Image (cartoon, rainbow, N blue to C red):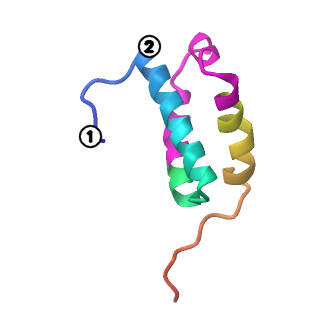
């Protein structure tokens, strides 16, 4: 997807956050952890731009997955992913 010229605001930003969380969850279900991690980071960056009222408009299931369950597996306390190349 090409970078957009104008930043997302309001309803468009909420829809984009929901879309990115759903994409991350689909990668999670497919056991594609690298793609899931990247998509989750993008969703979290957008999520942090939302106001408290806008965050409440995101379905609770998506908010829980983004903030709690995925943090368990992708949080900073976890071992970072390794390179696929062997030394």
User: In the rendered image, which residue does mark 2 sit on?
Assistant: 10
Find the distance from the CA under tag 1 to the CA under tag 2. 20 Å
Report if the CB atoms under discs 1 and 2 are less than 8 Å apart: no
At a point 52% along the width and 89% down the height, the residue shown is 87
Of 76 and 64, nearer the camera is: 64
Specify whether residue 59 is painted magenta.
Answer: yes
At a point 49% along the width and 36% down the height, the residue shown is 20
Q: Residues within 10 Å of mark 1 (few under 14, many from 20)?
A: few
Question: Considering only vertical position in the picture, is 75 above or below 17?
Answer: below
Q: Is residue 62 left or right of residue 22?
A: right
Q: In the rendering, at what x and y percent does residue 40 appear?
A: 56, 44
Of 30 and 6, nearer the camera is: 30
Q: Which mark is residue 76?
A: none
Residue 76 in sight here = no
Tell me which secondary structure the magenta stretch mostly adopts.
helix
Magenta segment, which residues?
A: 39-62
At a point 55% along the width and 37% down the height, the residue shown is 22
At a point 28% along the width and 37% down the height, the residue shown is 3
First in residue order: circle 1 vs circle 2: 1
User: In the rendered image, which residue does mark 1 sit on?
Assistant: 2
Question: Considering only vertical position in the picture, is 70 above or below 48?
Answer: below
**In terms of image quadrants, where is residue 59?**
top right
SS category of the residue bearing label 1? loop
Q: In the rendering, at what x and y percent does residue 9 appear?
A: 40, 17
Residue 53 in sight here = yes
Question: Considering only vertical position in the picture, is 80 above or below 15?
Answer: below
Which image quarter is the N terminus in?
top left
């Amino acid at each position: 997807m090409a970078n957009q010229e104008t930043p997302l605001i309001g309803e468009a930003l909420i829809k984009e956050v929901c879309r990115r969380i759903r994409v991350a969850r689909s990668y999670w279900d497919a056991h594609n952890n690298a793609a899931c991690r990247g998509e989750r980071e993008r969703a979290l960056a957008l999520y942090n731009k939302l106001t408290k009222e806008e965050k409440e408009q995101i379905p609770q299931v998506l908010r829980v997955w983004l903030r709690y369950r995925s943090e368990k597996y992708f949080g900073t306390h976890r071992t970072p992913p390794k390179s696929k190349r062997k030394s």
